[in-house]
Image: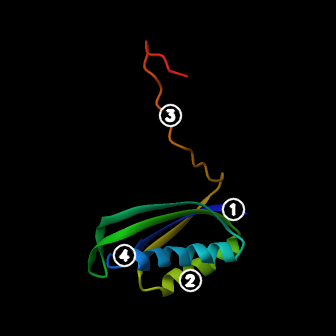
């Protein structure tokens, strides 16, 4: 399986349960076909760089996942058919996903860490 990252922009009027259902729908497309969701980031509502369908705002979502290449065509087909998705883009991570946890704060010089 390969590692992928898909970012999509959702219509700004899709909120609450409708938004969660939309994201779960696309996660379901991945998992139904043997893929594995690694991480999901919701960036929230942001101003778009340029208007899309006369809209200036959109909600950004990024899915990091592992799947077979054939699954990408189905995922993108479903995103293309859904009117709630303004734009989407899928990237292949050639060297795999390297998602790291945030670093722990290191004590400054002269301070000791309590155990």
For this rendering, which residue is in front, 93 or 17? 17
Q: Looking at the image, is mark 4 or mark 2 earlier in the sequence?
A: 4
Q: Looking at the image, is mark 1 or mark 2 earlier in the sequence?
A: 1
Can you identify the residue that label 3 sits on? 104
Does dot 2 land on a helix, a strand or a loop? helix
Does dot 3 land on a helix, a strand or a loop? loop
- Badge 1 vs badge 3, beta-carbon distance below 8 Å: no
- The disc placed on residue 42 is none
Q: Quadrant of the N terminus?
A: bottom right
Q: Is residue 5 above or below residue 21?
A: above
Q: Position of residue 36 (x, y in %)?
A: 67, 65
Q: Which mark is in front, 4 or 2?
A: 4
Q: CA distance from mark 4 to mark 1?
A: 31 Å
Q: Which mark is in front, 1 or 3?
A: 3
Can you identify the residue that label 2 sits on? 77
Does dot 4 land on a helix, a strand or a loop? loop
- The disc placed on residue 15 is 4
Please give the name of the residue rendered at 57% of the width and 45% of the height, measured from the top-left corner. Answer: 100
18 with respect to 34 (left or right): left
- Please identify the residue farthest to the front as the structure is shown: 115
Alpha-carbon neighbours of circle 4 within 10 Å: few (<14), some, or many (≥20)?
few
Can you identify the residue that label 1 sits on? 2
């Amino acid at each position: 399986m390969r590692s992928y990252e898909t970012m999509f922009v959702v219509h700004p009027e899709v909120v609450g349960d409708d938004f969660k259902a939309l994201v779960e729908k696309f996660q379901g497309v991945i998992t139904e076909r043997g893929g594995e969701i690694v991480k999901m980031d919701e960036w929230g509502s942001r101003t778009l760089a340029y208007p899309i369908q006369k809209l200036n705002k959109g909600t950004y979502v990024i899915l990091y996942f592992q799947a077979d290449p054939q699954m990408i065509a189905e995922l993108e087909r479903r995103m293309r058919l859904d009117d709630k998705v303004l734009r989407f883009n899928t990237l292949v991570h050639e060297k795999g996903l390297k998602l790291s946890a945030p670093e722990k704060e290191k004590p400054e010089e002269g301070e000791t860490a309590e155990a």
